[in-house]
Image (cartoon, grey):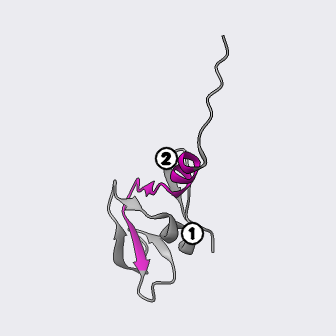
Amino acid sequence: MLRVVRRSAQQEAEEIAAPMKADRRLYLTADRARVVEEDDRDAASLLVPVGGAILTEVATRYGLTQLNGRVVLPRG
């Protein structure tokens, strides 16, 4: 039997606003303009440790997305 489940607008908003979970350490450059990998020579300060939350606002600011549990950095 098929069961239809309706989610409230609040539930949908909470899912969208839920922070990403970092799958690895991510760093900011010294000018705080980009997020880079740990081994990048421009890495200056830790943005988030492994397993840490990346707030939606931060992800949006730096163009971060998530695919299959892995944080995807923007190209460029």
Which residue range is magenta in the image? 10-28
- Across and down, in percent, residue 11 comes to 54, 46
Q: Residue at x 66, y 25 (%)?
A: 4
User: What residue type is disc 2 on?
Assistant: Gly
Residue at numbered disc 1: 60
Q: Secondary structure at mark 2?
A: loop
In the image, residue 62 sits, relative to residue 1, either above or below, namely below
The answer to whether any part of residue 41 appears in the image is: no
The residue most toward the top is 1
Report the number of discs.
Answer: 2
Mark 2 surroundings: few (<14), some (14-19) or many (≥20) residues within 10 A: few
Q: Secondary structure at mark 1?
A: helix
Q: Residue at x 58, y 48 (%)?
A: 12
- Across and down, in percent, residue 20 comes to 46, 56
Q: Nearer the viewer, residue 59 or 73?
A: 59
Give the mark toward the camera: 1 or 2.
1
Mark 1 surroundings: few (<14), some (14-19) or many (≥20) residues within 10 A: few
Q: Residue at x 49, y 51 (%)?
A: 70
Quadrant assignment for the C terminus: bottom right
Residue at numbered disc 2: 69
In the image, residue 27 sits, relative to residue 12, either above or below, namely below
Residue 38 lies in quadrant: bottom left
In the image, residue 43 sits, relative to residue 24, either above or below, namely below
- Across and down, in percent, residue 62 comes to 54, 73
Pick whichever of labels 1 and 2 is earlier in the sequence: 1
User: What residue type is disc 1 on?
Assistant: Thr
Q: Is residue 15 magenta?
A: yes
Residue 42 lies in quadrant: bottom left
